[in-house]
Amino acid sequence: MPDHQPIPMRAVTGPTPPAEAQDLCRTRIKAFERKAAHNKRESQFCFMAVVLCTGIVPLFITLGEGPVWGKAVPAVLSTLAAIATAWLQLRKPQQLWSLYRSAQRELEDHDTKRNFLIDEYESAPDPDKLLAKNVAAISLNVHHQWVPMVPNPDHLKVAPETAIMPKHPQ
């Protein structure tokens, strides 16, 4: 039996907190910028997939010869378009892109106002504390706007009156 040595426990710590409020703000700006860019790419990719696939399918159906080009290829393209459409509807990358880019711009505005002591930062007794408070509020607001966008099993259920039910003779 191998000799097992206990693994020393170390304190679980998160990332090192920023030294200043402006560092916190700039860190959040970069995070929202990355998230916005990711969702922009995802949104544009899926949208283009839907447009191209649905636009090309009729050409393959009318001009394609044989079962591969006339049936299989259009079926695959239609399936890809349906998957991309479902992804756009469930994941909502275009809304997330807008949400994260808006938060990024709002934080950039606060960073500039703090840097040059403009508006509320001009008369604030502690501009860094006000900036940290605003960064936290904006981040929490983004979270509260994000939560309803998360796919929920209740949203996927079909209402009984809209479901297509076969009619059975009684």
Image (cartoon, helix red, strand yellow):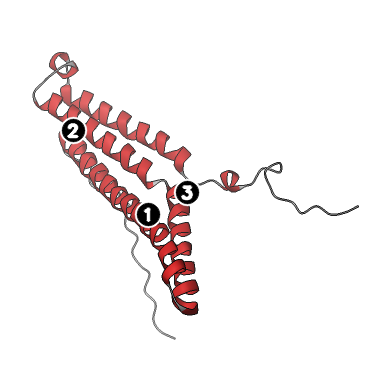
Q: Position of residue 109 (x, y in %)?
A: 18, 28
Q: Position of residue 58 (x, y in %)?
A: 44, 62
Q: Nearer the viewer, residue 105 or 135?
A: 105
The residue carrying mark 2 is: 108
What SS does tag 1 mark? Answer: helix
Considering the image in quadrants, where does the N terminus appear? Answer: bottom left
- Which residue is the extreme one toward the front? 63
Q: Is residue 70 above or below residue 42?
A: below
Indicate left or right for 150 with 93 as reference: right
Report the amino acid beneath label 1.
Val
Q: Which of 158 and 72 is in front in this view?
A: 72
Report the amino acid beneath label 2.
Glu
Crowding at mark 3 (Cα within 10 Å: few <14, some 14-19, many 20+): some
> Could you say which quadrant of the image residue 31 lies in?
top left
Indicate left or right for 147 with 170 as reference: left
Q: Residue at x 16, y 38 (%)?
A: 23
Q: Where is residue 42 in the image (x, y as percent from the top left)?
A: 33, 53
Q: Which residue is drawn at 32% across and 43% down?
A: 97
Structural distance between the alpha carbons of marks 3 and 1: 18 Å
Indicate left or right for 87 with 9 as reference: right
Q: Which of marks 2 and 3 is in front?
A: 3
Q: Earlier in the sequence, mark 2 or mark 3?
A: 3
Tell me if label 1 and label 2 are in contact, CB under 8 Å.
no
- Which residue is the extreme one toward the bottom? 1
Structural distance between the alpha carbons of marks 1 and 2: 35 Å
The residue carrying mark 3 is: 90
Crowding at mark 1 (Cα within 10 Å: few <14, some 14-19, many 20+): few
Q: Which mark is residue 51?
A: 1
Structural distance between the alpha carbons of marks 2 and 3: 30 Å
Indicate left or right for 93 with 127 as reference: right
Report the amino acid beneath label 3.
Leu
Q: Which residue is drawn at 34% across and 55% down?
A: 48
